[in-house]
Image: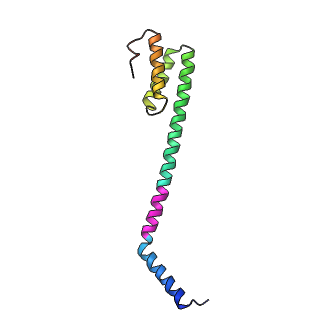
Amino acid sequence: MALDLEEQEQIDELKAWWHQNGKFVIAGLAAFVIGVGGWRFWESWNLNQASEASVLFEQAMQAASANDTKAVKELTGRIMEDQSRSAYAVPAAWLAGRLNHTAGDVKSARPV
């Protein structure tokens, strides 16, 4: 199929534009894909961290109900160390402090 002169000029212009800008287009697409992948990884990581903190806090609450001070200290300590930015860090500190205060260990029941 023969192309007329105008179509051939458009194809030549497109080829010239791609030759000049193709690397930038590919780099932009690669940056976009990497950015989206990084964002999705970060969201997944945050969700996993929150889930882990939730499980630890639930275990700490069950241990507190059973008056297992050692388990509560260990579990709340893990939350406050490993999950310090989660929403469970402050309630875990409160739970540990309350249990320590109830047990008469006022030194360990320090404010957060």
Quadrant of the snapshot with the N terminus: bottom right
For residue 6, side relative to residue 19 (left or right): right
* 29 inside magenta stretch: yes
Residue at x-position 46% and y-position 54%: 35
The single residue placed furthest to the top in the displayed view is 104
Q: How are the residues colored?
A: rainbow
Residue 64 placement: quadrant: top right
- Where's the C terminus, which quadrant? top left
**Is 61 on the left-hand or right-hand side of 90?**
right
Q: Residue 73, can we see it?
A: no
Residue 25 at x, y = what percent?
45, 68
Q: Position of residue 63 (x, y in %)?
A: 55, 18
What residue is at 59 percent from the left and 90 percent from the top? 2
Residue 92 coordinates in the image, percent (x, y): 48, 24
Residue at horizontal 49%, vertical 24%? 75
Asked whether residue 70 appears in the rendered view, the answer is yes
Residue 67 lies, with reference to residue 83, above or below; the image says above
Rendering coords of residue 73 (x, y %): 47, 19
**On the picture, is 38 further left or further right than 110?**
right
Highlighted range, magenta: 23-34
User: What residue sits 46% from the left and 82% below the top?
Assistant: 13
39 shown above or below 77: below
Work out whether 102 lies above or below 71.
above
Task: Find out whether residue 77 is within the magenta segment.
Answer: no
